[in-house]
Image (cartoon, rainbow, N blue to C red):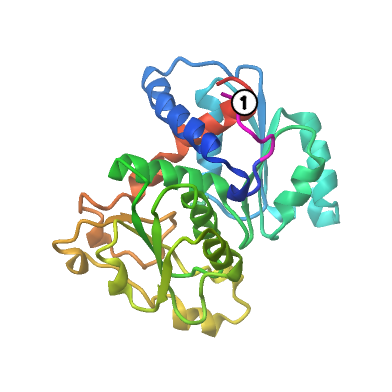
Amino acid sequence: MPLSFRHLTSTKQLSRADTDVLLQTSAEMEDVLKKGDDDRLKGKILAALFYEPSTRTRLSFESAMLRLGGSVITADGFQFSSMYKGESIEDTIMMAGGYSDIICMRHPEQGSADKAASVSPVPFINAGDGPGQHPTQALLDLYTIQKERGTIDGLHVAMVGDLKYGRTVHSLVFLLGLYKNVRFTFIAPDALPMPDKVTSFLKEKKIPYEETTDLSAGLDADILYMTRVQKERFDNVDEYEKLKLKYVLTAPQLKGKKVTVMHPLPRVGEISTDVDKLPTAAYFRQARNGIPVRMALLAGLLGVI
Ligand code: CP
């Protein structure tokens, strides 16, 4: 079944039928990865435009395209692009669309993805727009939750840390809202609460959530989704320094707990390395899931699933 969208800028666009197709296709892509002989995107070019730092998203998009037989062209760093000379996002995207068959872009400005999608002559994917959205991270998070817990319906999901600027949690809440009986606990310092755009969505959909500053409220959830405090979004470094290690998850805190620990990564101290050896520490498996999920999305948007 085809996807219902041509460009992906926000998880709010996705229907349950879309997530069903993408989760199923991602699982099939695991077999493609094992066999290693797929060339369904041979002759197709991905333009990967990254105007903010990235390790996982950029490398996994590139890897996904190459695993399906396609090719990649890249633009790295604002200061090395013509945006530095004043070129608009729209002009940049119209150019990139002439050089490629599909575009992914990370940009520091919230709303940049919508501007790009409004003019893109080829399918466009938001790879993170400032504190806005990170829809492909949310898709790989959803896939990880299904793999780790065997279901998505009925889960209690606790989200911890910088819920104000953390675009991954915004995107994930909208996706989880497509499933039955999911409930949330938002654990954040008073200065970094989940924004109204997310809580008003939950109120409208009558999806239960609670807000607290207490990390222990998440230790008996099904999913404990940790996030880093987003230093790059702060004007005041002292404010960041005060908040950066408000929550640090350690192995002793998880003793006897069954909660699945996730994190979009990079971590910068909020999960102690002693957690890594626990079987419930899913964050490195989560990062790896970015490959089959992005393969599924690229193939879907290019019409070969
Ligand atoms: N999770 C994530 O977006 O990581 P990168 O910033 O390294 O791409």
| Residue occupied by mark 1 | 71
Front in this rendered view, residue 145 or 174: 174
Instruction: Determine if the magenta segment contains residue 103.
Output: no
Relative to 119, say whether 247 is above or below: below
The residue located at (86%, 56%) in the rendering is: 86
Q: Main secondary structure of the magenta part?
A: loop
Secondary structure found at label 1: strand
Q: Quadrant of residue 31?
A: top left
In percent of width and height, residue 69 lies at: 55, 20
**Residue 259, quarter of the rendered image:** bottom left
Q: Dot 1 surroundings within 10 Å: few (below 14), some, or many (20 or more)?
A: many
Which image quarter: residue 251? bottom left
Residue 235: percent from the left, percent from the top? 63, 78
In this rendering, would 126 be left or right of 137? Answer: right
- Residue at 50% of width from left, 68% of height from top? 163
Residue 220 visible in rendering: yes
Picture residue at 49% right of the left edge, 56% below the top: 173
Query: Front-most of 200 and 260?
Result: 200
